[in-house]
Image (cartoon, grey):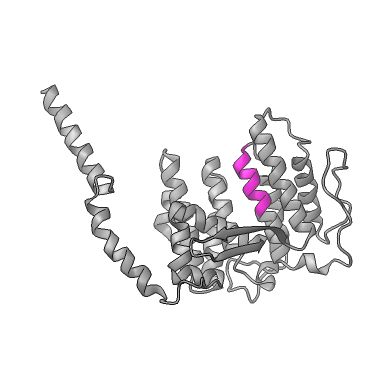
Amino acid sequence: MGALVKAGKAGRAVEPRVGAVEALSLTAFVAAAGPSVTLEVMHRLEGLRSCAPPVAAAALRGWSLLLSTLTAHQVRHINYDSDGEGGSSDGLERRLTALSKALASSDVGVRQAAGEGAALLYNQSGLATEQDSPSESGPITPAEPVTPPQATGAPEMDDVMARMRELATHRGDDMRRSKRDRSALKTTFRDLISSVEDGGRVASTKVRLSGGDCFEVSSLGGLVQLNAIRRFLAEGFQCHLAANPLLHQVFSFQPSGSAAGGAGFLAGIEEAAPRMVRSPSSASAKAATQKRGRARRESQLR
């Protein structure tokens, strides 16, 4: 853990630092031994929010990913020195205050990640289920007031919601932004506000597999997990979702064509490994090509 945190903080190149932060959060998500380890990693990720914007955004996304695994009681009593059974009840308020500050960032990615974290924190904490009546606000339009029509039950969350509504209508933003950035912010925060007002439900996201199976996610926590793993696996996501037992366990999803369990998946990986190593596009082949190129250039300069 310490090595990945150090890699996330050190160095001028941003991409390796972002990769280290994403590896840290995903490793904890998959292999954490319990809430105490999860909370410790979340604490480390909070310490990376002051880094460069891409690193800070990755830390916020990783923090939300781990938050999605906690119970309401653990979220309401976040204490990084305990296993979630005790702790201070002001942990929730302090987290919301920190996320509210991140919403004021000039970076679009940081704002989006902070908004997602705030919405998930509200839903995971159980505050949404404590409201006496559902929100009566309709779709957000530019003419709507920026003050939430209904209090959330937590003053800090009311402040966060007010800021998110401003971002959803592009109010209160003094930064000159491209049309693409403005559209991305509006779409993200409209969806997040709808999720908060609808008890954590989001528009259904479906992933169709080649065998005819369909994986569907309709909760904000599930969507956070799906996006994190999909971002990490990239083009290999559908292959893993179809045949990797670990993903079946994470998502409680069992495709009809995966009756053979993980044996077929592992056999396919073992069969493809030699071809991948010998391929001209493999990492080792590219490294060897670069080494030969450097050697030729050096010999020409002599």
* Magenta stretch: includes residue 259: no
* Magenta stretch: includes residue 110: yes
| Total residue callouts | 0
Q: Is residue 113 left or right of residue 278?
A: right
Q: Which residues are magenta?
A: 107-116
Residue at 41% in and 39% down:
13
Q: Nearer the viewer, residue 29 or 237?
A: 237
- 230 versus 243 height, above or below: above
Residue 111 % position (x, y): 65, 44
Residue at 83% in and 41% down:
141
Q: Quadrant of the N terminus?
A: bottom left
Work out which residue is located at the far top of the displayed protein and give it: 301
**Location of residue 185 (image quadrant):** top right
Residue at 74% in and 34% down:
173
Residue 44 % position (x, y): 52, 57
**Location of residue 266 (image quadrant):** bottom left
Q: Quadrant of the C terminus?
A: top left
* Residue 10 visible at all: no
Q: Nearer the viewer, residue 281 or 289?
A: 281
* Residue 193 visible at all: yes
- 298 versus 42 height, above or below: above
Q: Is residue 286 left or right of residue 263?
A: left
Q: Nearer the viewer, residue 183 or 116?
A: 183
**Location of residue 199 (image quadrant):** bottom right
Residue 130 % position (x, y): 82, 69
Residue 223 % position (x, y): 62, 59
Q: Main secondary structure of the magenta part?
A: helix
